[in-house]
Image: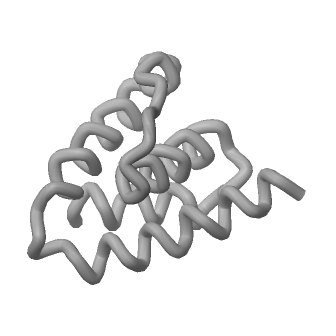
Amino acid sequence: MTGLKHARKRIEENPRAEAAMVLADLVISLESETPFLLERLNALKLADFVLSFELIAEWRMPRYYSEKGKLLDLALQAQNLDAQ
């Protein structure tokens, strides 16, 4: 399973969990090319920290285009949950 799929699964499992919110914000930041505070990644548990770097590496690869779209849609939904 790719980092993108793992991140999507992590967000789907509990979108209000801190790690899920950080991953969702990271996805939105990558897509919109806006700044993201790396200290937020440092606060994650090691497994989620490693996952975040897998996500970043795969984000740059064009072959994951469709998976990025699914993950971005889920990240936006999770961010909207947090705003409510």
Locate residue 77 relative to residue 50 in the image: left or right.
right
Q: What is the quadrant of residue 6 in the picture?
A: bottom left
Locate residue 49 relative to residue 13 in the image: left or right.
left
* Residue 18 percent location from the top left of the image: 65, 37
Q: Residue at x 45, y 32 (%)?
A: 36
Vertical placement of 71 versus 56: above or below? below
Vertical placement of 25 versus 60: above or below? above
Vertical placement of 17 versus 3: above or below? above
Q: Which residue is drawn at 23% across and 57% down?
A: 59
Q: What is the quadrant of residue 13 in the picture?
A: bottom right
- Which sits in the foreground, 55 or 28? 28
Locate residue 46 relative to residue 45 in the image: left or right.
left
Q: In which quarter of the image is the N terminus?
A: bottom left
- Which sits in the foreground, 18 or 62? 62
* Residue 39 percent location from the top left of the image: 47, 17
* Residue 15 percent location from the top left of the image: 66, 57
Q: How many marks?
A: 0
Q: Residue at x 50, y 56 (%)?
A: 10
Vertical placement of 13 versus 40: above or below? below
* Residue 32 percent location from the top left of the image: 42, 55
For the view shown, which residue lies furthest in the right direction?
84
Q: Which residue is drawn at 51% across and 24% down?
A: 40
Locate residue 60 relative to residue 27 in the image: left or right.
left
